[in-house]
Image: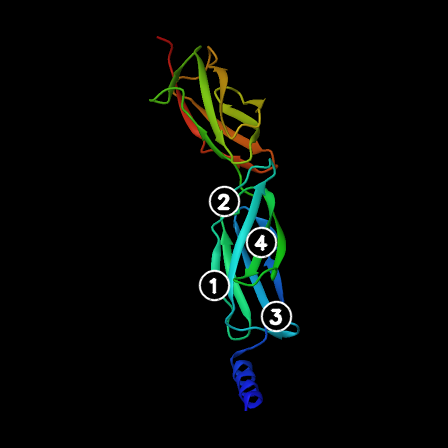
Amino acid sequence: MRLVLALSTCVSLALLGCDQPNNVLVTVSPEVVSSLDGIARVRAVVMSDAEPMPEQPLSLSVDYTDRNGAPHAIAPISGSTDGRGGFEAEISGLDWDGAGTVTVAVTGVIDVAAVATFAVIDRTPPSVSITPPTLSRHVTQGQDFTVPVRVQDEIGVSEVFLEASGQLDRLRSTVVASGSADATVDFELSVPDNAQVGGTITLYALAGDLSGNLAAGTPVVLTVDARP
């Protein structure tokens, strides 16, 4: 009688899914993430030997550092497998050039977990802005003036370029930046004594970051006034 009861219990458990998970298959797509997107998709399948396991609770954690070794927190995700043993999630915030790992573990089951790796490539250009030398955007014949160019980049600024055309007869200047994430570079310019009154000077700024991405700022147009 006890044997029959035990067999009945085993049959009942089998109907409910008596097997224990012993493996997790994890993939991350894409394996190389663009920082412009900053998103990767995780797919996991919980297995009991060769059989997928439905309705298994899972936890997903991310260990992510930039290329300078600084960690960047990504919120953990929890869920459970679907009717075919699969689990899908999306991780975001992968905005820094670097690498990381995704770990998916079956909740409550010791040592049943798997790890997948990913890399992030910086494709985000710096932001560039030109500050006009005067609020009125007017300069004077024979006048020296300063043009600040501010550049920001999460990885670091490599170079800042300023080009001026018009009454300056085209000038180009380059400054090598220090790799700062937020730099303001001052360019010193002079209006020629014989610059045409009412003529214009157009300022262009271009900057590059340490990953080789380039960006241009909005041009600034100055008007030349007569010497007082």
Lower sequence index among marks 3 and 2? 3
> Which of the labelled discs sits on residue 102, or is there none?
4
Q: How far, Cα to Cα, is label 1 from label 2?
A: 19 Å
Q: How far, Cα to Cα, is label 4 from label 1?
A: 15 Å
Residue hosting label 3: 47
Q: How many marks?
A: 4
* Residue in the foreground of this view, choosing between 69 and 130: 69
Q: Secondary structure at mark 1?
A: strand
Residue hosting label 2: 73
Q: Secondary structure at mark 3?
A: strand
**Quadrant housing the C terminus:** top left
The answer to whether residue 203 is above or below residue 21 is above
The local crowd at label 2, few if under 14, some if 14 to 19, many if 20 or more residues have their Cα within 10 Å, is few
Q: Secondary structure at mark 2?
A: loop
- Amino acid type, label 1: Gly
Mark 1 and mark 3 in contact (Cβ < 8 Å)? no
- Amino acid type, label 4: Val
Instruction: In the displayed orientation, state which residue is furthest to the top.
Output: 228
Tell me where residue 197 sits by quadrant: top left
Lower sequence index among marks 3 and 1? 3
- Amino acid type, label 3: Met
Q: How far, Cα to Cα, is label 2 from label 4?
A: 12 Å
Instruction: State the residue at coordinates (46%, 10%).
Output: 193
Percent position of residue 61, x then y: 53, 53
The local crowd at label 4, few if under 14, some if 14 to 19, many if 20 or more residues have their Cα within 10 Å, is many
Q: Is residue 177 left or right of residue 184?
A: right
* Residue in the foreground of this view, choosing between 164 and 126: 126
Q: Is residue 191 left or right of residue 63?
A: left
